[in-house]
Amino acid sequence: MNKVESVVIGIGLSVICPLLLMVLFWWSAALIFIYHILPITERAITISAITGLGLGIILDIVYVQKWIPRFYALDLKLMALVYLFCSAIAVAFCMGLPIGNIFLGILAGVYIGRRSHYSNYDRELVPRLTKQVGIFTGIVTGVWTLSIGLLALNEPIVIRMSQELFGITRETFTDHFGVVLVILLCVVLTALQYWCTMTASKISYHRD
């Protein structure tokens, strides 16, 4: 691993660790508050988010330099869990649009490409592993697209736009046309995500 790559990884880890912990603590406290699991106040949600951020910064100070050399040897199951959590954050921050997930899929492709480049994987294993990661990211993006698309069918602004664009009634859109449109969009974005991940992996694998 060259020095520039090490610096980029260090910066990425330094940002992502506090961010993930802040969101994890924030959302956990928010769920506890919303569903009345424990008697906490709204102020506790803010305190929880700040606590997560502070804990992440402490972990950065103590462990980042140790994580950098091991970055491409981390457990893939752990990376998959981190990816799923980042995917949920991307959906929330992008207001349901798949842009964030497409970007995450590209990063996943870069990661598996560089990991394969530095590891002593068998030549037959690399394409299979890359394909598995591409399928995984494609499925994640597809599931989000399908879920959010179906929920959006009853949104007034979506129905109004469909009536203006396609000249169809509200009932037709919510019953038949809209569902078909969401499924088609889901297929297209799943395929696009798969292609982006695979392409990013191939490019990063061959890059010195």
Image (cartoon, rainbow, N blue to C red):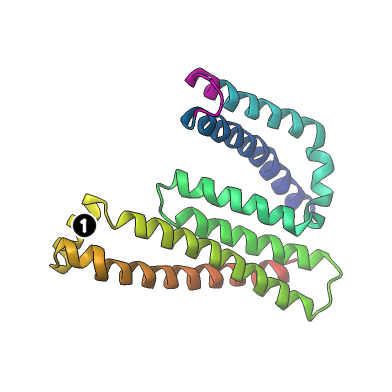
Residue at position x 50%, y 28% in the image:
36
Q: Quadrant of residue 21?
A: top right
Residue at position x 68%, y 72% in the image:
130
Residue 186 pos. (x, y %): 42, 68
84 or 134: nearer the viewer: 84
Examine the rendered structure and indicate whether residue 31 appears above or below residue 77. above
Classify the position of the C terminus by image quarter. bottom right
Residue 198 pos. (x, y %): 61, 72
Horizontal arrangement in the rendering, residue 195 relative to residue 69 (left or right): left
Q: Does the magenta stretch include residue 37?
A: yes
- Element type at marker 1? helix
157 or 179: nearer the viewer: 179
Q: Give the range drawn in magenta.
A: 36-46
Examine the rendered structure and indicate whether residue 54 appears above or below residue 105. above
**How many labels, in total?**
1
Residue at position x 74%, y 34% in the image:
60
Residue 54 pos. (x, y %): 67, 25
110 or 34: nearer the viewer: 34
**Residue beneath disc 1:** 159
Q: What residue type is labelled 1?
A: Ile
Outermost residue to the right:
120
Residue 119 pos. (x, y %): 84, 66
Residue at position x 71%, y 77% in the image:
127
